[in-house]
Image (cartoon, rainbow, N blue to C red):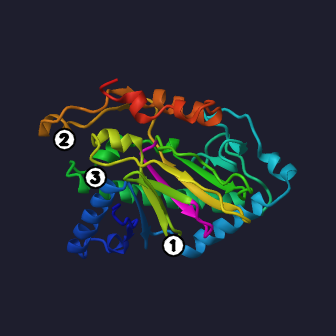
């Protein structure tokens, strides 16, 4: 019989108490470590992003995507970017969604609609809030793994390559409810703020488990870079989106990314120090990220032909 799986919901409030409640911090750190080892995904509450502000941003997201296509197309652009990704508005045929792509505030090439008003201001503030929350989680993960202080922060020290997507999934049809097909994310961490439509699922022990929306919660999951660095101590979970019937699904996805020039390989703390062989070969992040983005924009005819972390970087290939 398959074991019952419940995606953990973790309260981060103790980390906003400065040096108080060290015992509480240790307990939460251990819970997060276990979630990253078993599931690679968890939800967090009391995370530092005000609920009212998150909802304000979500309402602006809905207002933008509910406009006629002609209005949205005004922020379509072919501008250059420091990543191989198009800025601005796009429709994604394979994932049955439309999205607005944003790099850090102030990045040349970022484009924003003039309608709804204040859209740029709110999205830039949301970007910074999500970045702060990811940096908090990165520090917690660093401690949970027993790494030297700031090891992950010093390695992943370029915040110019982080990405925020504002997304709308179209309602399911009578014959199709698939949105984003099964995949892992190539970044370091991903953060998701979803509306109440649901549809996000994570693969655990061969079973698709719904990630039920919780008021004000953020969904965090481990991405491919951390799976490699930890030599599979943390898992980058396969996840997918099923579109709801009769309504759209709105979501923000924040990718806490890695500079493309960085080399990615298992850390010695999880190989040489403990006598385990590396499960992944050394590779430069831009090579892997470039392949994944190329296939995202132009998917292979067969889903099984998509590049995965294992097919790209397994030490046994």
Marks 3 and 1, how far apart in space? 26 Å
Q: Nearer the viewer, mark 3 or mark 1?
A: 1
Q: Earlier in the sequence, mark 2 or mark 3?
A: 3
Q: Examine the rendered structure and indicate whether residue 157 appears above or below residue 54.
A: above
Q: Helix, strand, or loop for circle 1?
A: loop
In this rendering, would 13 be left or right of 267?
right
* Residue receiving disc 3: 142
Q: Position of residue 185 (x, y in %)?
A: 48, 44
Q: Position of residue 303 (x, y in %)?
A: 57, 36
Left or right, residue 267 beside residue 261: left
Q: How many marks?
A: 3
User: Hey, which residue is sitting farthest top in the picture?
Assistant: 317
**Residue at the (60%, 37%) spot, across then down:** 296
Picture disc at residue 156: none
Pointer 2 residue: 269
**Residue tagged by mark 1?**
214
User: Tag 2: Cα neighbours inside 10 Å, few (<14), some, or many (≥20)?
Assistant: some
User: SS for tag 3?
Assistant: helix
Q: Residues within 10 Å of mark 3 (few under 14, many from 20)?
A: some
Q: Which residues are magenta?
A: 187-199
| For marks 3 and 1 on the same chain, the one whose residue lies earlier in the sequence | 3
Compare residues 314 and 45 and report the one nearer the observer: 314
Question: Is the residue under label 3 in contact with that under label 2 (CB below 8 Å)?
Answer: no
Q: Quadrant of residue 267?
A: top left
Residues tagged 3 and 1 counted as in contact (Cβ below 8 A)? no
Using the numbered discs, state the Cα–Cα distance from disc 2 to disc 3 in whole angstroms.
Answer: 12 Å
Of residues 148 and 217, the one nearer the viewer is: 217
- The 10 Å Cα crowd at callout 1, few under 14, some 14 to 19, many 20 or more, is some
């Amino acid at each position: 019989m398959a074991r019952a799986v419940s995606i953990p919901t973790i309260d981060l409030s103790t980390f906003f108490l400065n040096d108080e409640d060290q015992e509480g911090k240790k307990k939460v750190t251990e819970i997060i470590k276990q979630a990253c080892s078993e599931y690679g995904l968890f939800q967090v509450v009391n995370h530092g992003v005000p609920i009212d502000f998150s909802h304000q941003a979500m309402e602006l997201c809905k207002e933008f995507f509910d406009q006629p296509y002609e209005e949205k197309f005004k922020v379509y652009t072919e501008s250059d970017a420091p990543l191989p990704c198009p800025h601005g508005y796009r429709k994604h045929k394979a994932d049955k969604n439309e999205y607005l792509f944003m790099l850090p505030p102030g990045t040349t090439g970022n484009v924003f609609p003039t309608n709804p008003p204040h859209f740029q201001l709110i999205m830039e503030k949301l970007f910074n809030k999500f970045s702060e929350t990811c940096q908090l989680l990165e520090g917690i993960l660093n401690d949970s793994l027993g790494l030297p202080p700031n090891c992950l922060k010093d390695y992943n020290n370029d915040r110019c390559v982080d990405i925020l997507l504002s997304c709308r999934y179209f309602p399911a049809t009578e014959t199709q409810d698939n949105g984003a097909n099964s995949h892992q994310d190539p970044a370091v961490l991903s953060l998701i703020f979803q509306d109440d439509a649901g549809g996000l699922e994570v693969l655990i022990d061969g079973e698709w488990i719904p990630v039920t929306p919780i008021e004000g919660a953020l969904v965090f999951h481990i991405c491919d870079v951390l799976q490699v660095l930890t030599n599979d101590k943390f898992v980058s979970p396969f996840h997918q989106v099923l579109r709801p019937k009769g309504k759209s699904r709105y979501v923000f996805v924040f990718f806490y990314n890695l500079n493309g020039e960085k080399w990615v390989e298992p850390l010695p703390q999880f190989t040489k120090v403990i006598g385990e062989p590396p499960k992944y070969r050394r590779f430069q992040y831009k090579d892997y990220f470039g392949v994944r983005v190329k296939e995202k924009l132009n998917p292979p005819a067969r889903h099984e032909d998509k590049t995965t972390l294992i097919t790209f970087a397994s030490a046994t290939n």
